[in-house]
Amino acid sequence: MMGQAAVGVLLVVICALLEGVAQVFLKKSVLGGVRWLLWISCGVVMLLAEKVIYSQALLFLDVGAAFAISSLNLISITFMSRFLLREKVTRTRWIGVCLIFVGVALVAART
Amino acid sequence: MIRNNRMTTRKNFPIRLAVGLFVAILIDTILQVVWKSAVLSLPSDGSPWLNVRAVLHSPLFMFVILLMPCQFFNWLMVLRNADLSFAQPVAALSYVTVFCMSVFFLKEAADLVQIAGILCVLVGVWFISQTDHLTQPKEREA
């Protein structure tokens, strides 16, 4: 049986993944394909689903903790950009993303 | 040396992208601060129905609702001109601006750990800014 905090953490991690998928859909919608409307619709649905799940997560976690964990979306977005959109993610970009992740987590964890 | 070469061969940064990222950070900052102010103006002991009514009658919430589509369409414009893995981390600068606005306008407290976090974000964005903003189709690896 999972504790309430563990459920909250799990929900926020799911939100980070959903945000990554939603942003990939939005990026695909502007790449000039014929199915741009489908991609944009999927992106909006994913973003809405993420907001609903995040609201549920806030029932189990403090806002500061939830916000800190949700900064994982930077990592998930970078991974998905690399492997789903085939963007060129250099080591410099990875260092930047990791620093931002740590920075956001530090700021949010104290709120 | 290799890193210097990588930095000097960066492609030109389009003004449209710079403006789009600036607007994205600006709207996000205004949204967060106004949203927080709007939430604080709600009756704390009200029922959910009273809160919904208060939201519908609050100019601050109306402003937030108006800004959201602007933010969305501006973001699409940014994505049209930049990699997702470039734009999203740069837009994280809004964490810095929201933090500063919270401290200066909402009079929220800040400590050394948070300031260290802000510095981390700034250095991270600087690293991102040293990379190409857009992967060309021929550069996309299989």
Image: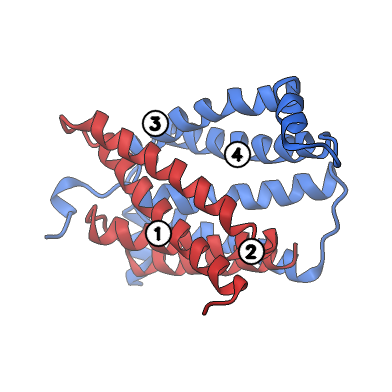
Chain colours: A red, B blue
Amino acid found under the numbered disc labelled 3: Met
Give the label, 1 or 3, closer to the camera.
1
B141 to the left or right of A46: left
Q: Residue at x 43, y 47 (%)?
A: B87
Q: Are marks 1 and 2 in contact (CB under 8 Å)?
A: no
Secondary structure beneath dot 4 equals helix
Amino acid found under the numbered disc labelled 1: Leu
* Camera-nearest residue between A106 and A41: A41
Q: Residue at x 73, y 65 (%)?
A: B114
User: x, y percentage for residue A90?
Assistant: 32, 65
Secondary structure beneath dot 1 equals helix
Q: Mark 3 to mark 2: distance in Å?
A: 36 Å
Give the label, 3 or 2, closer to the camera.
2
Give the label, 4 or 1, closer to the camera.
1
User: x, y percentage for residue B110?
Assistant: 82, 61
Amino acid found under the numbered disc labelled 4: Asp
How many neighbours does mark 2 have within 10 angstroms: few (below 14), some (14-19), or many (20 or more)? Answer: some
Residue indicated by mark 4:
B28
Q: Mark 1 to mark 2: distance in Å?
A: 19 Å
Residue B10, disc: none
A104 to the left or right of B80: right
Give the label, 1 or 2, closer to the camera.
2
Give the label, 4 or 3, closer to the camera.
4
Residue indicated by mark 3:
B77
Q: Are marks 1 and 3 in contact (CB under 8 Å)?
A: no
Task: Answer yes or no: is residue B133 visible.
Answer: no
* Camera-nearest residue between A78 and B82: A78
Task: Answer yes or no: is residue B70 visible.
Answer: yes
Residue A17, disc: 1
